[in-house]
C-alpha cells in the first residue's frame, strides 16, 4: 500500500523516538501531562504509519487493518517501556543527559575572567544572519556570556548586523543581568545596531575593537568573508578570541586567528550545553543516537549484501531476507 522502503519507515520511527525521548529525559522534572500525552500521540501515529508500511500487501480488508494495528500497538508498547525505563529509571541513577565539555567552552570562562582582571570590555558578534537557527544558537551562548559578565562586572559590547536581531539580543542580555541580580548594571546602549551591509558591519566592529581596546572577543553565529577581518583585528589588538560557526568555509580562518574555535556541529552542542535548554539538549543527544542507528543500519545492509554475493552458507539466506524486509524487491 505504501511505496516507501521499509528501511526508511523504520529509520524515521527510530529518529522520531530517540529525539523526543531525549527531550523528555532532559526535562523530566518539569514534564507536563500535556507534553507526555503529545509524545505518546505522536509516536503512536508514527507507529501506525510504520505498521501500515510493514503489513503484507493486499486488499484493504479487516485482516490488513488488524495486522497493521497489531504491529503499531506492539511497537508502541515496546517503545513506551523503553521510554519509561529511560526517563524515570536511568536518569534517577545518572542525573541527566551528558554532553562532553568542549575545550572552546572552557575558554569562555577564561576569556571573561581575563577581561575582568584587565578592566577592559568584551565584544560578542552574532554574525551577519537574521533570526535563523544559527543566530538562535549564538544567542544561547550570548546569554551565558552575559551572565558571566553581570556576575563579574565586566562590560559586554554586542554589535548587531540585522535590525530584527537587536531587540532579541537586548532581551537576552537583559534577562541574563536580571537573573544575576545586576539589572542596574545593564546598559542597552552596549547592544547596538551598526549596519546590514557586510563590510560596513565589519568596519564598524573593527573600529569598536580599536576604540574600546577589548580584552576578549566572541564570534558565534553565521559569518562570511568578513570573518578573517574581524578575527585578525582582534588578534592585532591583543584580545583573547573564542569563535564558533557551523559554516565550514569560515572555520579555517577562525582556527588561524582565534585562540579557540568551536567547529561545525559542536556549535549547536555548545549552545545546548551552556543553556541547558531541555529541547536543545534532548535534540542533540537524539540526533547522535539517530546517526548511530543509521550507521548500524547501513553496516548491516552492507554485511547482508556481502553475504549474498559471497554465498556464505546460512548467512546468505538471512541477508536476502533482511534486505527484502527493509527494501522490498532488493536482495
Image (spheres, rainbow, N blue to C red):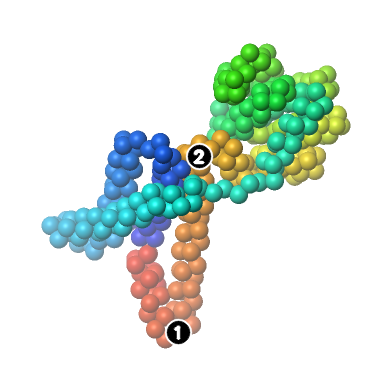
Residue 239 horizontal side relative to residue 54, left or right: right
Name the mark on residue 280: 2
Residue that extends furthest to the bottom in the rendered view of this protein = 313
Residue neighbourhood size for the residue with mark 1, other residues' Cα within 10 Å, grouped as few (<14), some (14–19), many (≥20): some
Q: Give me the residue at 38% from left, 49% from top.
A: 88
- Camera sees residue 116: yes
Name the mark on residue 312: 1
Disc 1, SS: loop
The percent position of residue 265, horizontal first and vertical second, equals 60, 46
Q: Give me the residue at 46% from left, 69% from top.
A: 300
Image vertical order of residue 86 relative to residue 190, above or below:
below
Disc 2, SS: helix
Q: Give me the residue at 66% from left, 29% from top.
A: 148
Comparing marks 1 and 2, which lies closer to the viewer? 2
Give the CA distance from mark 1 to mark 2: 45 Å
The percent position of residue 105, horizontal first and vertical second, equals 67, 41
Disc on the earlier residue, 1 or 2: 2
Q: Give me the residue at 41% from left, 39% from top.
A: 29
- Camera sees residue 51: no
The front one of 69 and 25 is: 25
The percent position of residue 13, horizontal first and vertical second, equals 37, 53
Amino acid at each position: 500500500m505504501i511505496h516507501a522502503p521499509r528501511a526508511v519507515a523504520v529509520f524515521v520511527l527510530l529518529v522520531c523516538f530517540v529525539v523526543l525521548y531525549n527531550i523528555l529525559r532532559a526535562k523530566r522534572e518539569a514534564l507536563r501531562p500535556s507534553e507526555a500525552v503529545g509524545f505518546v500521540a505522536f509516536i503512536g501515529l508514527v507507529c501506525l504509519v510504520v505498521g501500515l508500511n510493514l503489513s503484507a500487501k493486499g486488499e484493504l480488508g479487516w485482516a490488513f487493518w488488524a495486522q497493521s494495528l497489531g504491529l503499531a500497538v506492539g511497537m508502541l508498547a515496546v517503545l513506551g517501556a523503553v521510554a519509561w525505563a529511560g526517563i524515570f529509571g536511568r536518569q534517577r541513577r545518572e542525573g541527566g543527559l551528558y554532553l562532553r565539555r568542549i575545550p572552546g567552552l572552557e575558554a569562555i570562562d577564561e576569556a571573561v575572567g581575563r577581561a575582568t582582571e584587565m578592566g577592559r570590555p568584551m565584544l560578542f558578534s552574532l554574525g551577519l544572519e537574521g533570526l535563523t537557527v544559527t543566530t538562535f544558537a549564538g544567542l544561547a551562548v550570548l546569554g551565558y556570556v552575559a551572565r558571566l559578565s553581570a556576575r563579574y562586572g565586566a562590560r559586554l559590547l554586542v554589535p548587531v548586523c540585522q535590525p530584527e536581531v537587536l531587540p532579541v539580543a537586548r532581551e537576552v542580555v537583559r534577562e541574563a543581568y536580571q537573573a544575576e541580580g545586576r539589572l542596574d548594571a545593564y546598559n542597552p546602549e552596549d547592544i547596538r545596531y551598526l549596519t546590514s551591509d557586510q563590510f560596513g558591519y565589519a568596519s564598524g566592529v573593527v573600529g569598536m575593537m580599536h576604540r574600546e581596546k577589548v580584552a576578549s572577543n566572541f564570534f558565534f553565529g553565521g559569518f562570511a568573508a568578513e570573518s578573517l577581518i574581524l578575527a585578525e583585528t582582534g588578534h592585532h589588538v591583543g584580545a583573547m578570541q573564542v569563535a564558533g560557526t557551523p559554516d565550514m568555509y569560515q572555520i579555517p580562518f577562525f582556527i588561524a586567528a582565534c585562540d579557540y574555535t568551536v567547529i561545525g556541529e559542536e556549535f549547536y552542542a555548545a549552545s545546548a550545553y551552556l543553556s541547558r535548554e531541555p529541547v536543545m539538549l534532548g535534540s542533540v543527544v537524539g540526533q547522535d543516537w539517530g546517526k548511530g542507528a543509521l550507521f548500524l543500519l547501513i553496516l548491516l545492509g552492507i554485511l547482508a549484501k556481502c553475504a549474498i554475493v559471497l554465498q556464505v552458507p546460512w548467512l546468505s539466506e538471512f541477508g536476502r531476507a533482511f534486505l527484502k524486509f527493509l527494501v522490498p524487491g532488493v536482495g
